[in-house]
Amino acid sequence: MLRSLLQDFNFIDKIAHFDRERIPERVVHAKGAGAHGYFEVTKDIRHLSKAKFLSSIGKRTPVFLRFSTVGGEKGSADTDRDPRGFALKFYTEEGNWDMTGNNTPVFFIRDPQKFPDFIHTQKRNPRTNLKDPDAVWDFASLVPESIHQFSILFSNRGTPNGYRHVNGYSSHTLKLVNDKGVGHWVKFHFKTDQKIKNFTGEEATKLAGTSPDYATQDLFESIEKGQFPSWTVKIQAMPLDKATSYRWNIFDVTKVWPQADYPLIEIGKLVLNRNPENYFAETEQAAFSPSHMVPGIEPSLDKMLQGRLFSYPDTHRHRLGANYLQIPINQPYCAKVSHHQRDGPVTVNGNFGSAPNYEPNSFGGPHQAGRSASLTPYAVSGNVDRHAVGIKDDDFVQAGNLYRLLSAEEKTHLVNNIAGAIRGAKKHIQEREIAHLKKADPEYGARVEKAVLLTSQRI
């Protein structure tokens, strides 16, 4: 009879590692796919930013882009109705810039304190462990600022045909600063050169059962075949002093800047041309944060962005460890890194050898970043308090404008998609959300109301 003994080190070592192979799943953006590529400058914008990777036409910077669904678990279907994450890491000579965006130009909320609450509504009911339409629509109908994003989500843009056919957006307002200290508020747009292509709700649901990894497979196979997906990179730019007088609060991520007011300016080309060699090492361990910036790119006063500046690195430290930036996919390998962070689990970079880990010092150790990496100064005044974002207009105008821009067929899909989703919620919740839709556009709300009634009568 064969027996396993503790002296069988090969078995013990193998099973002990197996028992520890899984790391925590991302709370959001759990399922995704990634690829390497490059960003190439096509327009001189040194008058807007001093960032070195933007310094000359034709300059290329290596990048890694991770696409994802947002609310679903790691085993969810690629075609589920959900926003798509568009997280892009630029490996610049001044360090890494992470552009943590989505495939939508707006978001559901503008207050970071609501973010855990919103995500909880997209997860599972704490009692039944089932998806809960009451939670989704109760929250949505009590937070009318969400109507713009929900209108995008329940259009066919909520079920894109793979990752190659989505746009990417910074969504948040950022700040570009030139070498003279002059700043502009900007929004980044990554326009797919493959053209926007979406599934209907019915097509997406069918694929979820027959090809749940559709987008992952499509991206991988297209790159393997040499059909490299690309995006034209554009920005909207606003002088700093125009923000206070603009019709919309530019720091409210539930709003867009109409392109008639601030047209798109082309600045570059993004190309994906290489698949990861190992999914876990690269895509799963990739860690993005909007706080990872380079000189010439700065945060704005967007409250949601300010919340993410802390939350993203914090979750990486939990999921990957305090030294997550030593993981090769996250290393700013095009720049020399000097700081005073030492020790901690999985220190694999030599721990900076004998260099001192304090400042000031007399032994040639690193100094804290000087003015080149600090934020440009700005004046503030007022009381310290939890202030609501100043609303210059109600939350329904842009959602109504979006509805009226849709074709007749697109309107029908949007109406039917919302009606199909909301029918599972309690009647008073349905009525509250439909009232918001009517404020956006009377026809929009009335059609959803009629579709919900007809759907309920068939059941």
Image (cartoon, helix red, strand yellow):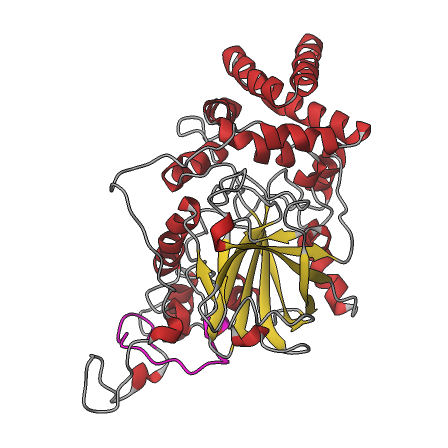
Task: Specify the quadrant that holds the N terminus.
Answer: bottom left
Vertical arrangement, residue 202 with respect to residue 46, above or below: above
238 or 306: nearer the eye? 238
Magenta span includes 338: yes
Residue name at image x 67 percent, y 33 percent = 402
Position of 135 compared to 64: left or right?
Answer: left
Vertical arrangement, residue 383 with respect to residue 134, above or below: below
Vertical arrangement, residue 41 with respect to residue 65, above or below: below
Q: Which residues are magenta?
A: 329-347
287 or 321: nearer the eye? 287
Residue 73 lies, in percent from the top left, at 52, 44
* Quadrant of residue 397 within the rendered picture: top right
Residue 271 lies, in percent from the top left, at 69, 67
Vertical arrangement, residue 256 with respect to residue 87, above or below: above
Q: Is residue 1 visible?
A: no
Residue name at image x 51 percent, y 16 percent = 429
Magenta span includes 246: no
Residue name at image x 73 percent, y 42 percent = 210
